[in-house]
Amino acid sequence: MTLAAGTGTEVQKPLATVFIRGLISATMLTLVVLPALYARFGGARATAPVSHDEDDGGAALFRQVAEQYP
């Protein structure tokens, strides 16, 4: 649509350009900017090793996470 040159493209071309730029910026925000911000401000917490000795449906993992965030 952005490269079209037919009838009605004077309306569709700007709309297609905005749509494509929006998709690109949303993808970059999701894949690059947000992980970088998370790594900088919130992802540097140390976690305890999770024991997988018994199959309790994830209850041990839930308890460990709950202890870290009271």
Image: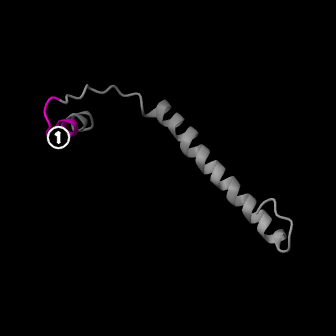
The residue at the point 65 percent across, 49 percent down is 24
Residue 28 quadrant: top right
Residue 50 quadrant: top left
Magenta region:
53-63
In the displayed orientation, state which residue is furthest to the bottom: 7
- Whether residue 48 sits left or right of residue 38 in the image: it is left
Q: Where does residue 59 sit, x and y in percent of width and height?
A: 17, 40
- Whether residue 12 sits left or right of residue 49 in the image: it is right
The residue at the point 17 percent across, 36 percent down is 60
Q: Is residue 70 above or below residue 10?
A: above
User: Considering depth in this image, is 1 or 66 the residue closer to the camera?
Assistant: 1
Q: Residues within 10 Å of mark 1 (few under 14, many from 20)?
A: few
Residue 45 quadrant: top left
Q: Where does residue 55 sit, x and y in percent of width and height?
A: 14, 37
- Whether residue 22 sits left or right of residue 9 in the image: it is left
- Whether residue 37 sits left or right of residue 66 in the image: it is right
Check if residue 30 falls in the magenta segment.
Answer: no
- Residue type (three-letter) at the residue carrying disc 1: Ala
Q: Residue under circle 1?
A: 59
Q: Is residue 57 above or below residue 52?
A: below
The residue at the point 60 percent across, 50 percent down is 26
